Amino acid sequence: MQPVGLALSSEEHPPKELVRQAMQAELAGFEYALISDHFHPWTDAQGESPFVWGVLGAIAQATSTLRIGTGVTCPTIRTHPVVIAQAAATAAALMPGRFFLGVGSGENLNEHVVGARWPAANIRLDMLSEAVDVIRLLWKGGNQNFKGDFYEVENARIYTLPSPLPELYLAASSENAAELAGQKGDGLISTAPKEGIVDTFRKAGGGDKPTIGQVHVCWSEDEAKARRTAYEQWPNAAIKGELGQELPLPRHFEQAAEMVTEDDVAELVTCGSDPERHLDAIRKYLDAGYEYVYVHQVGDEQDGFFDFYRREVLPKLG
């Protein structure tokens, strides 16, 4: 599989457009994609947030070779892990050998909607660990029961089980999460090329399992336009610290974004049409030990982005 895949941004695009982008990705030579699973967008300017499992069903019918996973699903609060186990099994049955489940500890932005308390970070990681146990238990088939610290399963059986079962990747932005991913995941997903994350994952049991990082870009022939688009559509890229996990509403992200500048965003979102700059952004992850990188094109210039990557970027990365 080639190093570069595509990010399908559910926060920015309606369902039919996400399906179209998946089809375009396949035609452009992308071999895999990850689709975000949100209840809310980060900001109102992004403006979308369709139900990922419905979109995946449509993508399954519109593509034939594209491998796709969730990047990432939170199986702990908004949706019980029993439901995620069934949803992922169905998606994998629609795309035999092409679907994988990416899971993470989530954001308050999406999880508070069911009225549950937003736990501390260490508790969220414990919940994710137990949720993974529940999902894997149900994927064994047969009647299952489970009683843990956070979840209870009573006489549950998933009847539609695919062959093969989907791989289960864990997201990590800290060493504790990377350790959990190494212990319980079939692979690692991360959104920043932090030193130590891949090493921790591998030493904790990840071995030679796949590692995937996410790069944000905004392609346009006009670099100034690309910078404006990135700032208007994806200012959350430059919001630092734990706010991404803790803020509950899109308007709070908009308020936080008032404290970042266009230059701040452009430092983290590769803007313009210089292929070397796009290649450099990707290589930062490869140099940090990631084998695969999935690229998020910010904004509406998707067709130009696909053509640019097909001609100028993918051929140079194998």
Image: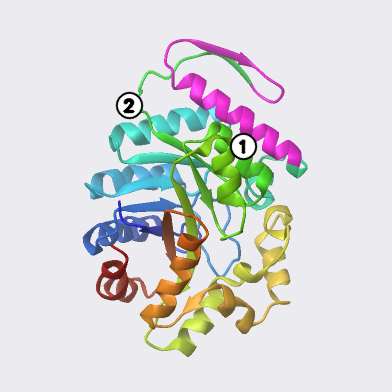
Counting other residues with Cα less than 10 Å from the Cα at mark 1, is it few (<14), some (14-19), or many (20 or more)? many
Q: Nearer the viewer, residue 276 or 52?
A: 276
Which residue is rendered at x = 59% and y = 66% of the image? 44
Q: Which residues are magenta?
A: 122-151
User: Is 91 left, or right, of 131 in this rendering?
Assistant: left
- Give the quadrant of residue 92: top left
Which residue is rendered at x = 31% and y = 56% of the image? 2
Asked if the stretch drawn in magenta spans residue 69, the answer is: no
User: Is 164 left, or right, of 214 in this rendering?
Assistant: left
* Type of the residue with mark 1: Leu
Compared with residue 165, is residue 223 higher up or lower down, i.e. above or below? Answer: below
- The percent position of residue 186, horizontal first and vertical second, equals 46, 36
Q: How many marks?
A: 2
| Residue identified by numbered label 2 | 162
- Check residue 180 in the rendering and tell me which mark sits there, or answer none: 1
Q: Is residue 110 visible?
A: yes
- Give the quadrant of residue 238: bottom right
Asked if the stretch drawn in magenta spans residue 133, the answer is: yes
Q: Secondary structure at mark 2?
A: loop
Which residue is rendered at x = 34% and y = 73% of the image? 305
Question: Of discs 2 and 1, which sits in the foreground?
Answer: 1
Compared with residue 77, is residue 200 higher up or lower down, i.e. above or below? Answer: below
- Give the quadrant of residue 292: bottom left
Quadrant where the C terminus lies?
Answer: bottom left
Nearer-N-terminus badge (2/1) = 2
User: Is 119 left, or right, of 143 in this rendering?
Assistant: right
Q: Nearer the viewer, residue 285 or 223?
A: 285
* Type of the residue with mark 2: Pro
Q: CA distance from mark 2 to mark 1?
A: 25 Å
- The percent position of residue 256, horizontal first and vertical second, equals 72, 70
